[in-house]
Structures are given as C-alpha cells and as structure tokens.
Amino acid sequence: MRVDPEVLDALRRWARDDLRSVNAQVEFILRRALMHEGRLPKGGRKRRGD
C-alpha cells in the first residue's frame, strides 16, 4: 500500500499512542469505518483492542 509520508507518520504516532502496531492500527481504523458504513458482516469477530 502506498501512503503519503505525512499520513504514515501520523498513523505511526497514533498507533504508538494506542499501544498498537501500525498494522493493528490500520485494521482497527478499517473495521471502525466498515462498521460505521454497515459493511462489516454481522457476526464478524472482534479483535483485541476494538
């Protein structure tokens, strides 16, 4: 995935603040957006940190 360096830096800081890896932070953000939009399948498992 290509990400603007400023966006990646902000994501790294956010992940560090939340005690997550960047990968876990991206998944957290994606899951939250999918739930908000009603696109996450019902019964989808919750991940640690959600």
Image (tube, grey):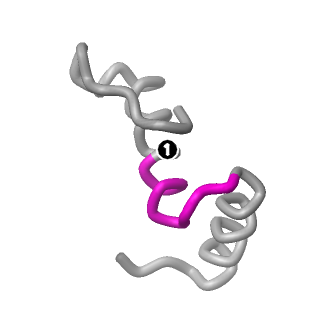
Q: Is residue 50 left or right of residue 38?
A: right
Which amino acid, by three-letter code, is at mark 1? Phe
Q: Residues within 10 Å of mark 1 (few under 14, many from 20)?
A: some
Q: Is residue 23 left or right of residue 25?
A: left
Q: Is residue 43 left or right of residue 18?
A: left
Number of callouts: 1
> What SS does tag 1 mark?
helix
Q: Is residue 35 above or below residue 30?
A: above
Q: Is residue 13 above or below residue 6?
A: above
Magenta run includes residue 20: yes
Q: Nearer the viewer, residue 23 or 9?
A: 23
Q: Which residue is mark 1?
A: 28
Residue drawn at (64%, 72%) of the image: 7
Residue 26: where, in percent of width, then height?
48, 56
Residue drawn at (55%, 64%) of the image: 21
Q: Nearer the viewer, residue 50 or 32?
A: 50
Q: Which residues are magenta?
A: 19-27
Q: Is residue 2 above or below residue 37?
A: below
Which quarter of the picture shows residue 12? bottom right
Residue 8: where, in percent of width, then height?
60, 75
Q: Is residue 11 left or right of residue 27?
A: right
